[in-house]
Amino acid sequence: MNPEEGGEGQRGELNSFGPPSKLPPRRDGPEGNNWCRVDFIVDSGASDNTLPVGVLPGIPMKPPQGFKDFALVDGRIIPNLGQKVVQMAFQCGLVLTGAFSVVYSAKPLLSVGKMTNLGHTVKMTPEGGQIILKNGKSIKIYFRNGV
């Protein structure tokens, strides 16, 4: 993900089957200090795309948009602290811009509901899945540690 809109950075495999330390380095995508790898959980229960506090500290946080608070599965309520707009480079070569709510959480989430509301399709299979963008291009989803 690019902590500065419009920059260049490193592209790597998202959510591969192996641990990140065993992935081969990729030199065919965005590179440099302005990019870092962030693995997302594709979450059918998430109401919004989220980033944990402290992820991508170089991106300025804007005021929250949309949800004021989020309810966790255990009933706790956490505040929407703000929004970050980032560029994402996927292993298939696509570079997309996305908005993420910043929250106190452990993992970054991509909301299936948000993606389908924007006109995209999400397909899941036992082998993984794919996000089919409304323009017909596809992003592969990989499982890591059963998620």
Image (spheres, rainbow, N blue to C red):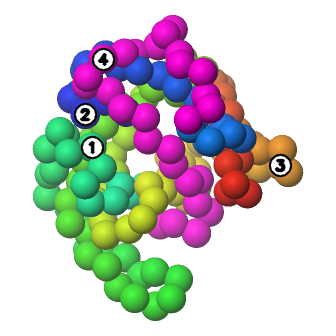
Q: In which quarter of the image is the N terminus?
A: top left
Judging depth in this view, the residue of 78 and 99 nearest the camera is 78
Which numbered disc, 3 or 1, marks the residue that appears first in the sequence? 1
User: Tag 2: Cα neighbours inside 10 Å, few (<14), some, or many (≥20)?
Assistant: many
Q: Residue 56 carries which label?
A: 1
Label 1 with label 2: CB-CB less than 8 Å: yes
Which numbered disc, 3 or 4, marks the residue that appears first in the sequence? 4
* Disc nearest the viewer among 3 and 1: 1
Say which residue label 4 marks: 32
Mark-to-mark CA distance, 3 and 1: 30 Å
Label 1 with label 4: CB-CB less than 8 Å: no
Predominant secondary structure, magenta span: loop
Residue for point 14% across, 58% down: 63
Asked if one can make out residue 48 in the rendered structure from this viewpoint, the answer is: no
Q: Residue 3 carries which label?
A: 2
Q: In this view, does 69 lie above or below 126?
A: below
Q: Which amino acid does label 4 sit on?
A: Gly
In the shown orientation, is residue 43 left or right of residue 57? right
**Residues in magenta?**
21-47
Q: Which amino acid does label 3 sit on?
A: Thr
Q: Is residue 9 above or below residue 59?
A: above
* Disc nearest the viewer among 2 and 3: 2
Provide residue 70's location: percent of width, then percent of height.
Answer: 37, 76
Secondary structure of the residue carrying tag 2 is loop
Say which residue label 3 marks: 125
